[in-house]
Image (cartoon, rainbow, N blue to C red):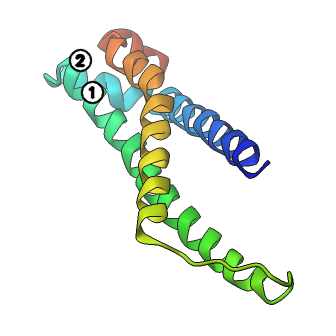
Amino acid sequence: MVVLISSISVFVGAIGIANVMSMSVHERRGEIGLLKASGWSNLEVFRLFIAEALWLGVLGGAIGATVGSLTGMLAEGFIPGLRVEPSLVAFLKGMGLAVLFSLIGGIIPSVRASRLSPIEAIRGA
């Protein structure tokens, strides 16, 4: 049951990151156009947006793992027999999954950003 709930949470998180990245690309069309007009390649624009997705995953994973550990330790006082022992391995697995799914969620918006025509992006901004 815990694995199912965790899997759903990770899936929802990946969709959330994809949505945030899509909105970021849409709102920053003018900036993308200016970057490309000033000589940035498609790969450089892709890297910019995928790096943003990576940082969202790192920060979200760290915050999620910390809040999850604290919530688990707090729940020990309310649920008899529950033992929560935060471990570095669990923290690193959580961080790894958060980063992986944020990168997966950021791929499509990053590709869309890299394929924007500078003229269309500036005109549409």
**Amino acid type indicated by mark 1:** Val
| 69 versus 108 height, above or below | below
* Quadrant of the rendered image containing residue 72: bottom right
Disc 1 residue crowd, few under 14, some 14–19, many 20+, Cα 10 Å: many
**Residue matched to label 1:** 45
Q: Position of residue 114 (x, y in %)?
A: 32, 18
The residue sitting at 52% across, 57% down in the picture is: 60
Q: Residue furthest front?
A: 81
Asked whether 19 or 81 is in front, the reply is 81
The residue sitting at 57% across, 38% down in the picture is: 20
**Residue matched to label 2:** 42
Q: Position of residue 85 (x, y in %)?
A: 58, 78
Q: Secondary structure at mark 1?
A: helix
Asked whether 74 or 39 is in front, the reply is 74
Asked whether 76 or 116 is in front, the reply is 76
| 35 versus 71 height, above or below | above
* Quadrant of the rendered image containing residue 64: bottom right
Q: How many marks?
A: 2
Q: Determine which of the numbered discs, if any, sits on residue 87 in the image.
A: none
Q: Position of residue 124 (x, y in %)?
A: 48, 17
Disc 2 + disc 1, Cβ < 8 Å: yes
